[in-house]
Image: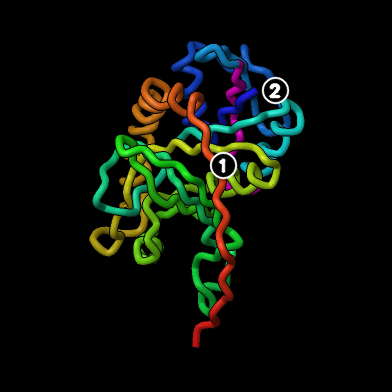
Amino acid sequence: MIGISVAAKKEWEATLNYFGLTHEECEKYPFGEYFKRIIDNQEVILYLGGVRKMNASASTQYMIDHFNLTKIIVAGTCAGIDDSYNPLDIFIPNKAVQYDCTVKETEPLIKDSFTVLNNFENESILTGTIGTADKPVVMWKDYLELKENNITIADTESAAITYVCRANGVECIIIKGISDFPKNEAETSNEESHEEQLNTFLENIPKIMTRIYDHYLVYALRTSINYQEYESKPTTIKK
């Protein structure tokens, strides 16, 4: 069976609306709810996994254990980091990194041990590096730091999910759409810039989820990717 992981409640609401379901029609499990469908002649289970790395990791392992999943598709929104792209652009990343696992004052922001690579290539689909941390990218200084480290898009779940999938020998394909870009709070205030970003995020959620389900889901169901090995590099302590 193939799992489709949806993290945020608003993304889940858009998913239920797309498939014409209510919460009452879903099955419950410890991290949220789920329902099953036949899509492209394949049985899939769509589930609310929860936001942040802890919920994402735990729900991923639960679904793998209880439904014998062979592939997980991560569908949802993300923050844009590389400003050569635009809101509503959809990506299937070929690199996922957890960037909040180091002492960044003395170590590199990104370590190989918290990085998962895959061999995805398709000239007609955007790809790149997705960065994941428990803290959303809201503050301008955080945005600039990720941009300096060549992160393309960022969220709070995907790299943790694919890390767990790789450990279980389960395929993972991430499909993420840019809902918003961080705003420079120096131009207004912390509160105003955050509110503007949040409003944009909420407005774009249903547009992105519809675009993913309409144009990318069947492709992901039919596509197979492999994890790539990489040589672990020694950590350099900053002076």
47 or 159, which is in the foreground? 159
- Rendered residue at 42%/23% (across/down): 213
Q: Quadrant of residue 176?
A: top left
- Rendered residue at 56%/38% (across/down): 172
Point out the stretch of residues depicted in magenta: 43-55
Q: In the rendered structure, which amino acid carries the disc numbered 2? A: Lys
Dot 1 falls on a residue whose secondary structure is loop
Instruction: For label 1, count other residues whose C-alpha is less than 10 Å away and answer few (under 14), some (14-19) or many (20+).
Output: some
Q: Quadrant of residue 211?
A: top left
Give me the disc on residue 96: none
221 or 82, which is in the foreground? 221
Distance in Å between CA atoms under marks 1 and 2: 17 Å
Give the residue furthest to the right: 66
From this view, report whether residue 181 is shown above or below residue 234. Answer: above
From this view, report whether residue 211 is shown above or below residue 143. Answer: above
Give me the disc on residue 28: 2
Q: Which residue is labeled 1 in the image?
A: 51
> First in sequence: mark 1 or mark 2?
2
Disc 1 + disc 2, Cβ < 8 Å = no
Q: Position of residue 99 (x, y in %)?
A: 52, 61
Q: In the rendered structure, which amino acid carries the disc numbered 1? A: Val
